[in-house]
Image (spheres, rainbow, N blue to C red):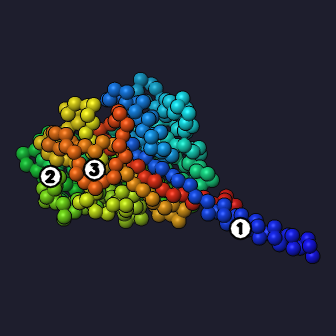
Amino acid sequence: MKTLRFLALLFVAAFFLQCESSNEKTVLNVLQFNVWQEGTIVDHGFEAIINEIIHTEADLIALSEVRNYKETNLAERMVTALKEKGFIYYSEKSEDTGILSKYPIIAQMNVYPLKNDHGSITKAIIDVKGVEIAFYSGHLDYLNCAIYLPRGYDGSTWEQLDAPITDLKEIEKINLASERDDAINAFIKDALSEQKKGRIVIYGGDNNEPSHLDWIVENKHLYDHNGVVMPWNNTINLEKNGFVDAYRKQYPNPLTHPGFTYPADNPLVPMSKLAWSPKADDRDRIDFVFYLPNEQLTLKKVKILGPKGDVSYGKRVLEETSDVFIAPLSVWPTDHKAVWVEFELSLRLRSGT
């Protein structure tokens, strides 16, 4: 009888221990970071990138504009630089888009390979304390950049037009002439497949295209939208397939929280390198973190990493919005602002999944 009672108590203890372990949670910080040609445009830019990763305690970083200049390996350089500062990260060599992780990378592959500088998407399967995450880094085609058309500029040459283009069909035609939709379609197909495998899906990218949630009736006369209310194709496609825009989930009102990420004012860079349409207000949110809803993943905080200033009409301007910022350190390495997202990740025992 004593033996049976002991075994019963042991069973109950094991049950509650498993429940407790299954309910264990961890913070997961995601950073989407266009590093502007690996930080080469700004003096000490590479070191600044490393410092901001440490500064934000980022766990998963989606990098845009990976170049591997002069036959170097950016992934290797970053891992080494972080190790020298006492931080262990993992990364594998890639092109245009890159992934840096505080957790081991099980596998990495191209979902949309770079070709003729028309953008790319890289995926890594990452083991976060026993939970597998399919993490994607995107840097989409920068040509046929239709956000410039209503602002009176060509989206491939950046020459000033005779007049702004405000016809929705014309904007859509030029927008779809890019390869951004091809990349997003490839991503959606792959990500939904990963979801079916039980993996958590997170995407960070510079999409070079804004959101339909930002070009709305209420701001159609702001930021040189010139009356355009634009159903931007790729964010609509992502939304239809269940993806959540972390920034707009946290801050649904684009009037109070426009979340501009480009063009960012960088006081260390001359205006000639920052303003592509100097006679227009082309402030926009083109850098994103998306995720597929999952019971193990809870959105907690979203902030913009970078200077509070922007570039508008060829001048440096200070934002007067309610956007929440993480102030950068002394050197900001890029002409974009980054998107920082804190998730809460529920961990499950491998035997219980």
- Residue indicated by mark 3: 260
Q: Nearer the viewer, residue 89 or 68?
A: 89
Q: Earlier in the sequence, mark 1 or mark 3?
A: 1
User: Count of labels shown?
Assistant: 3
Asked if residue 153 shows in the view, the reply is: no
Q: Is residue 291 above or below residue 278?
A: below
The type of residue carrying mark 1 is Phe
User: Crowding near pointer 3: few (<14 within 10 Å), some, many (20+)?
Assistant: many
Quarter of the image where the N terminus is located: bottom right
User: Crowding near pointer 2: few (<14 within 10 Å), some, many (20+)?
Assistant: many
Q: Position of residue 311 (x, y in %)?
A: 21, 42
Residue at the (32%, 63%) spot, across then down: 252
Residue at the (37%, 27%) spot, across then down: 44
Q: Quadrant of residue 233?
A: bottom left
- For the residues labelled 2 and 1, the Cα–Cα distance comes to 59 Å
- Residue indicated by mark 1: 16
Q: Residue 224's mark?
A: 2
